[in-house]
Every structure is written in C-alpha cells, then in structure tokens.
Amino acid sequence: MYASFGLVAAVFICGTYAANSVSSHFGSAERQKFKNVFSEAISTGDAAHMYYAIEGYRLLNEIPKSTQESCKVLGTLVTKATTPEMLFYVVSAVKHLSCTNIATASAVKSLQEIFSSETATVTDLYHAVIGLKNHGQPLNEANKSKLAKQLQTLLKKEDTLLNLAQAFHIASELGMNGEFITERIEDALAQADEVDGKMLQFEGGLSMTSMILTGIIRLSKSLRKSSYLTPDQSVKFSTYLLSRRSVQTAKGCALLLDALSSISNDKEISPAVITLVGSPQISSENPQISLRVCNLLGQPLDIPSDSVIAQSGTRQGQVVLSKQKLIPAQTDKTLYKLDLMKIKPEKGVYKLALSAGQHTGNVVVKVLGRISVKTLEVSIGDADQAAPAKKQTVAYPKKLSTTLEADSLQRVLLKVLLTDEADGKPVTVHQCFIKLSNANNKHEIIFVAEQDNTQTYKFEMDVGSKSIDFNHKSGLYHMELIVGDALLSNSFKWHIADIKLKFGQEPAISELSSSRLPKPEIRHKFREPDRRPSRLVSDLFTGLCLTPLFILFILWAKLKINVSNFPLSLSALGFHSGFGTILGLFVVFWLKLNMFDTLRYLSVLSLVTFICGHRLLKSIAQQKK
C-alpha cells in the first residue's frame, strides 16, 4: 500500500553475530569480463600471461577454446625456459592444459635442482615447489624436512612481505614440517592497511593481498587447524577484493579469483552476501522485495532454505516485523522474496535485520505511499482585497474549462489540500510547486506553495508586484501543480488551468532599477607624478653635486700634478679609458638605461678594464725593479 520515491537502498553489516556479511559478490557480468581477459591473454604467446589465463579458466571451471594452439606455443616455450619463474609458468600451464605431446622432463629436472642450489631464494623455492605440485610431483618427507630448514634460514636473512607470502605457500606443502611459519602469520597480518574501517589490504595491492590470504588459508588446511583469519578480517579483506573487480590484467583476474575461491571454500570464515536485488521500493503495486543470499562467488550457501529469516523490521526504532521467513525462488537458489505489505506498514524507511544460518546482514527498504487531491480552489481577486474573490473548484486530474484572467491590479490565489489515500488525513510533502509557463515562448517561472496551519498548501501571487519576474510579458500562461516526495509512489504534475496575465506598461529605461542598467565603464588611472621643483632649485642642486669635481681639478692645479710619467702603452690607455667609460655608463644608467641593459654593458667593460689594469700594474712593477 505504501512505498518510496526514488532512493537507492543501502546495505550494510549487522552486528547480532560476528560481522560476516558483505554487500556485493562476483557475478555473471564479472565472469564474462574475466573470460574475455583470459581469452586475449592466452593468445599473446607470453608464458606468464598464458599461465594466468589458463589458471583463471581453471578457477572458473572453463576450458579454453584454443587448447591445441596454446599447447603448440607452450611446446616452443619449454625449450626456451631457463629461469625458475619461466619454468614454473610453462610446467604449470602444460599440466593444466593436459598437453600430451610436450616433453617437460628437462624443465621438471631444472625445478628439482633448485632445492640443492646454494643461491636459491625464497622466490626460487616457491616456483619450484608450486611448479612441481602443479605438475603432479609432490615433495617426499626427506625433501620436506630439508626444505623447512632451508626456508627458515632464508627468512632470517630477509623476511619481506613477498617472502612471507611465498613462504606460506611453500609451508602449506610441507605438512607438519611447515608449522614453524605459523608464528609469522600474526606479524604478516599486522602489516595490512585498513581503509575507512571497511577494507583491509597489503602494500603491493591485489597481488600481494591475494598471495598472503591464499597462503594463510592453505596453510591452515594443511595443518588441519582453525583459520588464522578472524571473521571480521575476512569481511574486510573480501570487501577489498570485491572492490577490485574492475582489474584488467590476466594476472590480476586470476589472483582475485583464487583469493575469492579460497575464502569462499573456508566455511569457518567465509562471509555471506546478503543484498537487495532490484528496486528497494515497496508499494501496493510492488509488494515484494527480492534478496540474494550467496557466497562471494555468487554460489548458494550450504544452509537450509528455511533458515533465511527476517529477524526484525524497524522504523524509527519501532519494531513492526519479527521472525518472518523469506520465500526461496524456484528458479534461483540464491534468491529469496519477502512480502512486507502483508503487515500493512506505514510509509517510511525500514531497516530489516536478516539472518541466513549463522550469517547476518541488514538491508534498508522504503515503503511508498499514495496521496490524493481532496480539494483545489483557485480564485482571482483585487490586490487590495476590497471585494471578495470568486472561487472555482477543480477536480483532479481535470483542467478548468474556462480561461482565467488577471491584470496588474489583481491577485491569484490557489489552495490545495493533499490527503493520504489510506486514512484520508492531510499530509506534508517534500515538494509542492506552482509552475506558470508562457504558451508562446515557453518561458516559465516556478513558485513554492507553502502549507498553512490547516495543512492546506497555499499559493498567492500579486500580479503587479511579480511583473518583473515575468519580464512584463503579458499573455496566456499554463498553470501546473507539481507534487513530489521521496515516499510517494504517485508523484504527479497536473495542468490545472490556463490564465491570461496582463501586466502594466513596461517602465522606461530611466525608471528601471539601477541594478538592471549597464554600469559605467571602469577606467584605471595611475597616480599622477609629484610636482617637480623649479629650474633654479634643480640647477643649484646639480652645481652642488659637481662642486667636488671642481675642487679636485683646482687642487691638482695647485699641487702641480706631474703627468709626464704616464705610460703611453695600450694597457694604460685601455685601463683609464675603460674606467672612464664605466663612470660614463653609470651616468647614462641614471638618465635612461634600465638595470639589465646596464649590467650587460658593464660585464663587457669590466672584463676589458680588468685585463688592461692587470697588465698596466705588471709593467709598472717591472719598471721599478
């Protein structure tokens, strides 16, 4: 009977049990996209790309289309593989594709020789152990014990996050000999970065996170011990992995699938997916909501179908639903339906607490309601209300048969009462607008109808005072009522009537508000220079500046300075000329040059003056000797 008007459902984790639900899963769209990525990667001829593509197909339980062509390519790559990594890719890919005509004995032997190499790293051992495992050659007990000691020695030298991730995988193949590595699991998990309190990931992104998670899960299964991951960690890691479904590389796709599969197959920590399917809005036309309950890969949970229960439904803290079983769909084992309209809820937002076995989750839905127009009155009267206005009633959804007319001395008044279809009580909506649109130029203006103390929506317009909002354009206008709300299923737009508006004469330009007139042009003015002193003051100041020079010449004359010893050499003339030119440059700088030009000239003159001066002083010193 009730429902919501266009909001999306929010799904989040419930806390009745340990938080072990997420809101999304790996679905059919992602599956098809990953298959396309693998199809492109397997045809590249690159060993790494081919391995991850084949591994991805295996995780999807799919068979590549071009198996024979891929085997031919792998046959050529086997002879070229020399590094442990390349050997791992080729040997594993050949085995997964069941290529029968490829001789891998030499490659397998090379992997086995890594165990006796003194220079082998943790990465080399990882490629050797997992490559031989993929080829169907597990380690014997003697090699397991020896490898465990070798791995401990290497980790003491370098225990990077990558080495730890690979060591977890190696230890998972060593049986009880790999138990020593369990004490490093907590250290590794402590290095995970938390994002917004919702996700956990390791530095290195998807590859590192997948490697560590799958290694830890496989190690716990190998040792037959409880999971080293907590349910809360599992949920946060799963949330991060699902956020990376847009990955575009074969390696990223394969590692993501491997991590999701490992978590989903671990019943102890595997989170459930409890999420809405389709619209979260409920109404009398759509009384049921659909929910999907599955694991991370979109597969059905291993639980009884009658264990999926809506434990409670609350609205503003009030419980309206308790322990109602969901109905499983006949065609899809992951889909369940719940009919909320059986309890005849009021319109509003409801939070449903759901349980599926030991998994719990919350979903938010909206129940939509319907409204009706009980009365609508429109009237035209004098603006000064000197005479009573004539009222006309319009029934929804009809249009007034006559055309209303109003001039600048009149006012338009509209009153509308909206009621709930269920109980007939007046309701308040989020949006109640009156739109007036010009029939000729489609120019429109929208007014807000306000609710009075009787909960009746009221719109009143003085035609003369609103003339400027209509650009003084008289003519025929369409009057429409627009009603909308987030909790309405029948929001509507209703053409109530046509009205001819006649505004007063448009005022002249001089009478318009100054805010609507062009502003005067802005002309920037620089500050006027200060008034210069008189010519007498300037000449007097110049004479005072030249006085020391005159005094110098007078003193030289009285002292009868001897210039006969002035050497007439090139260096002497160059030095004195250069020095004099520099002084002249300062005068020119004061009169007209700028600093940059002066420095450019000065750099040349200074160099010439320096060289000439140095030679002049050298010659004077030699003459004195």
Image (spheres, helix red, strand yellow):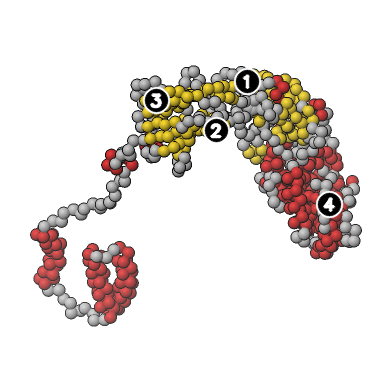
Task: Calculate the distance from the C-alpha at mark 1 to the C-alpha at mark 2.
Answer: 21 Å
Q: Amino acid at mark 2?
A: Lys
Q: Secondary structure at mark 2?
A: strand
CA gap between label 2 and label 3 equals 25 Å
Mark 3 Cα shell of 10 Å, populated few (<14), some (14-19), many (≥20): many
Q: Which mark is residue 381?
A: 3
Give the numbered dot on residue 63: 4
- The amino acid sitting under disc 4 is Ile
**Which amino acid, by three-letter code, is at mark 1?**
Ala
Q: Tell us which disc is closer to us: 4 or 2.
A: 2
Label located before the other in sequence (4 or 2)? 4
- Residue at 27%, 73% in the rendered image: 578
Q: Amino acid at mark 3?
A: Gly
Disc 4 to disc 2, C-alpha distance:
56 Å
| Viewer-nearest of discs 4 and 3 | 3
- Residue carrying label 2: 493
Report how far apart the C-alphas of labels 1 and 3 lie in the structure.
35 Å
Locate residue 465 relative to residue 555 in the image: left or right. right
Helix, strand or loop at disc 3?
strand
Q: Quadrant of residue 304?
A: top right
Report the residue marked by disc 1.
422
160 sits to left or right of 599: right
- Vertical order, 258 against 64 (above or below): above
Labels 1 and 2 touching (C-beta < 8 A)? no
Q: Nearer the viewer, mark 1 or mark 2?
A: 2
Does 222 sit above or below residue 33? above
Q: Name the foreground residue: 70 vs 340.
A: 340
Spatial separation of the CA atoms under disc 4 and disc 1: 58 Å
Question: Residue 515 location in percent, x, y?
Answer: 32, 40
